[in-house]
Amino acid sequence: MATRSAEDLHRLAVELCISGRYARALSVLTLATGRTDDPDLRARIEGTRALALQRTGSPSEAEEVLREALAARGLTAHTRAILRGQLGALAMYGGRLDEAERLFGEAVEALDDTDPLAAARVRMNRSLGRMQRRDLEGAAADAEWAATRFAAAGLATDEAHARHNLGYIALLSGDLVTALEAMLTARPAAATTPVAGAVGDMDRAEVLREAGQTTEAERLLERVAAVFGAHRMPQSRAEAEFQLARSLLAHDPDRARKVALAASRRFQRLGNDTWAHRAEAIGLRAGMPSPRRRARDGVAERVDTLATALAREGFRGEATALQLTAAAADPALDGRPIRIRDDAPLEVRLIGHEVRAARAARRGRYGDVRRYAARGIDTLAAWTGSFGSLDLQTSAAMHGARLMYAGLDAALRSRDPEIVFEWAERARHLSQQSTPLRPPPDPQLAAELAELRTIRAERPGADWLDEPRAAELRERARRRQWAHTRAGETAERATLPNVRDALDADTAVLSFLYTGARLAVLVSDSARDTLVALEGPDRIGALLSGLRADLDMAAAVRSGPLVSVVQSALQTRLAELSAGLLDPLLTRTDRRRLVLTVPGMLSGVPWGMLPAMEGRVFTAATSATRWVRAMSGTASAPSASTAFVVGPGVPRGEEEVARARVAWPSAATLVGADATVRGAAQLAASSGVLHVAAHGRHTADNPLFSGLELADGVLFGYDIDLIPEVPRVVVLSACEVGRSSVRWGEEALGMTRIWLHGGAESVVAAPVRVADDDACELLAAMHEGLAAGEAPAEALAGAAARTGIRAPFQVHGRGF
């Protein structure tokens, strides 16, 4: 260090800043200052010092240092342009976007022709400022210009940062697929230090949040905030907390309010009023549902003041979102007009529809509530309709949850069966409006999933996906599925007359509705349509919360003195669920066959075990629209090409398959070491019926990594996309893989939904644990019916009648 020149020391300090080691950089810059009398070099040293001071929580001092540097005599025009660009960066970080735009423009004009690399760095910062101003076209032009210059100079890291920024611009324009693709492509070259990685992760968390995958986004943001805290970067840490609060706003307003106000205070200590206003606005929005809090804190007055400040500072969308949230919650504001720009973000446009629906509800005009809610959901559907990925479809429904509940509530108030059915289907249809096209073969994804299987085998704990390499591969899998799974034909929602046309004299459709506060069912058969109110969802939820433990215990305790006690507790709970969910309905129809369409909160109900279902045949359809569409086609004939796969460690797995194979003499079978993922996938691609007897695991936070444990590892949900053509009927004799993760009320995602999304007509699975003895006997008997040409639901019901076994297996999809 003692022999280094001032220029070398300055270059080192810049590298230290890039790596987030600001305290060390400031020390090096002090040494550099004492080793030169060159005014231009001293000014550039001070410019770097200013940026380091800003990032470490001294924005006022940083600006003073930079302005003093600019005032020095004898500086070249080139140095002054660089300093103006740095001053623009300080203004941008401070939220003074108009000032930043002016300073950046002056710097770019002077540097574009004389120093393209310096101009590229200024343009990078200007692109960030323009993103905040919602000038996405200008931001993209700057980022692309910079990326081109960096690439020409061989600066791979700088180019990666520019490409990452282009991904963020795609996010702001609503293109989540391109955003994730760009960010993950740039990450290896851009994330050269913990700080650089944290910056990228914060942006990627925003993509996940906008996709509705808030759990993962929030974990990422918490880690990012910790990295910035460890590097003493209070501004960046507060920005991560601001983004965390924005994510929590969708599902945990109490915590969102606390996190947002803590971030606001952090910004205030930095003297950054603009960012403090942005964070406070999130805190106010989180507190809006509470009338007491609004009155006590004088929120209405503060909303107006804050919205005015945000609009003045360039954050018009956030100002409008704040005002609209207040208008939706406060009847006193019903007289205020709603003004939303045509280019407003999707969030703002959806909140606008929420406000109109809320005002109509307060006036008792429920027809208008439905109309406004439908417009909002159609706006959302126009965005999600291009998504082919099931993962993205189900999670993006987050944005329409409040509108959906408002519409469902208003539909129930109408008591009109056709209106109620329309909204039941609207709730189910958002993630099913387009039929996915099968993605092309992807050898790279197959190789990465194989590596994940190895990691899973070495890390059997629940947190295995958080191991660094597994997390990286998980991101790649998501990226490939989002990017490569395309939406196909868009289907119209079925109407109640469409359903009546599809019903025969033996079948009824039970359309369950959940409004967030009420449960009801529309019972439709060829004779009539009847709307039935059910017990409150809290009561049903309490019964379901204890049911899993009762079923697990009943599956585990098969002999001894505790059997009667365990069975008695289970039967009592099942009877209570039956009384709450089915008994009121089945007095309204005598049809033997039932099509159930249910919201996510009921996805764990073992319908076949409920006493009221005895003597009935049922199928759990993802929507009535899908069922009607399937019934309009010709049912596939039972395939002579049937396959069985037995995973390791299933006590009666081989016996189960041997007994089932009696019905299919030519069936192919994989057992022992032959029951590999590749082997199972190859059989699936060539079989009409696939039966897998294996241990299964449901991964709640990452349902597409749920799977079946085979000889060489887990067959994941992602593997199903690699199968060119899936079987017509899939039987999953595996504990837990019938489970689903509920996403935003209506949407449930698990292995059954993944197989159906991939093209299977029917999937037989259990949402809870099943005793090995019951699975062995019941499913073996079911194959007798399948081989004889019975539809899957008829075959399963017949097997239950012949064996006397009432197990939680049920048919999803067409069923009959």
Image (tube, rainbow, N blue to C red):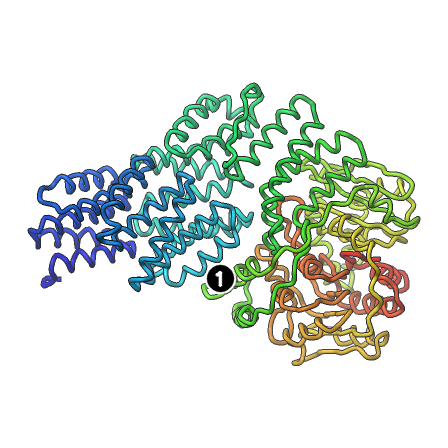
Check disc 1 and give the amino acid type. Answer: Ala
Frontmost residue, 238 versus 735: 238
Q: Position of residue 754 (x, y in %)?
A: 67, 59
Q: Secondary structure at mark 1?
A: helix
Q: Looking at the image, which is closer to me, 138 or 309?
A: 138
Q: Quadrant of the N terminus?
A: bottom left
Q: Is residue 722 above or below residue 172?
A: below
Residue ID at (54%, 64%): 461
Percent from the top left, x then y, of residue 773?
79, 68
Quadrant location of residue 274? top left
Position of the C terminus by quadrant: bottom right
Q: Say whether residue 420 is left or right of residue 193.
A: right
Q: Position of residue 213 (x, y in %)?
A: 55, 50
Q: Is residue 736 visible?
A: no
On screen, residue 730 versus residue 131, left or right, reads: right
| Disc 1: CA contacts within 10 A as few (<14), some (14-19) or many (>=20) | some
Relative depth, front residue between 507 and 571: 507
- Where residue 335 sits, quadrant-wise, is top right
Q: Is residue 413 left or right of residue 181?
A: right
Quickly name the residue at label 1.
471
